[in-house]
Image (cartoon, rainbow, N blue to C red):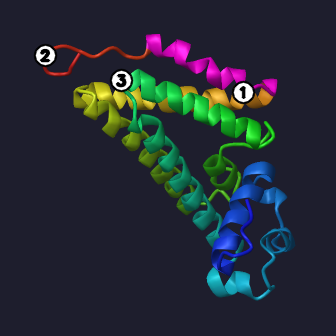
Amino acid sequence: MDTSALPTKDRLIRAAAQLFRSRGYHGVGLNDLLAEATAPKGSLYHHFPNGKADLALAAATWASDEMLRVIAASFAGAKTFEDGATTLCFKLAKLFDLTGQQDGCPVGSTLFEGPGNAEFLRHAERCYEGWIEEVQDHANRFGLQEADARRRAEHVFLLIQGGWQLARARKSSEVLRGLPELFAHMPQAATGTGRN
């Protein structure tokens, strides 16, 4: 994607998201970021006063927002929760192929491999929680009770995160395309009050 027309700050964020996803936080230097973003040297600290750490948080937020859009698009035309979750897996399989089958989770590669400070870990939790809540909202829309919707959303998240790692190890997006078969083992809707 050509990002040359974007403002410098946006170019830096997208470059960081891509580089951190493929190389991890510690595998990317400031010169790498500036070169990838075609940004002048002083622009990094102008937009991100704490340098690489601030940029990492912004890149993780951008990547997380992109994932939220993928989730929303996957469930938009779905007839059932399982249909939406299946579409999500297929969209992620396509993304996996487009990224060269080696890139990690954009949030995890940036924040868990970062300096390990509490702010990074809290931010990762917020990003992941946002993904789970987005899936949960769709589960609610399909009539699942709150507790069941939450369990299913977390189940989808765990399957996708684990599936992505296994797909990287096997260098095959078929792992992600095979995840819908596991949806049959998702927690089933409880009866009555929504409690087991």
Q: Is residue 179 left or right of residue 187?
A: right
Give the vertical position of 146 relative to 183 (above or below): below
- Residue 120 lies, with reference to residue 4, above or below; the image says above
Asked which secondary structure carries label 1, the reply is loop
Q: Residues within 10 Å of mark 2 (few under 14, many from 20)?
A: few
Q: Gap in Å between the C-alphas at discs 2 and 1?
A: 39 Å
Q: Position of residue 170 (x, y in %)?
A: 80, 23
Secondary structure under tag 3 reads loop
Q: Quadrant of residue 41?
A: bottom right
* Magenta span contains residue 171: yes
Distance Cα–Cα, label 3 vs label 2 = 21 Å
What is the x, y in percent for residue 16?
Answer: 72, 64
Asked if disc 1 and disc 3 are in contact, CB closer than 8 Å, the reply is no
Q: Nearer the viewer, mark 3 or mark 2?
A: 3
- Say which quadrant the C terminus sits in: top left
| Residue placed under numbered mark 3 in the picture | 80
Tell which circle, 3 or 2, labels the residue nearer the N-terminal end.
3
Is residue 89 rendered to the left or right of residue 94? left
Q: Is residue 121 above or below residue 179?
A: below
Q: Which residues are magenta?
A: 170-185
User: What amino acid does circle 3 point to?
Assistant: Thr
- Residue 112 sits above or below residue 60 on the image: above
Q: Is the residue under label 1 in contact with that under label 2 (CB below 8 Å)?
A: no
Residue wearing tag 2:
192
Q: Residue 173 got which mark?
A: 1
Helix, strand or loop at mark 2: loop
Q: Position of residue 120 (x, y in %)?
A: 58, 59
**Residue 134 marker:** none
Looking at the image, tell me whether mark 2 or mark 1 is earlier in sequence order: 1
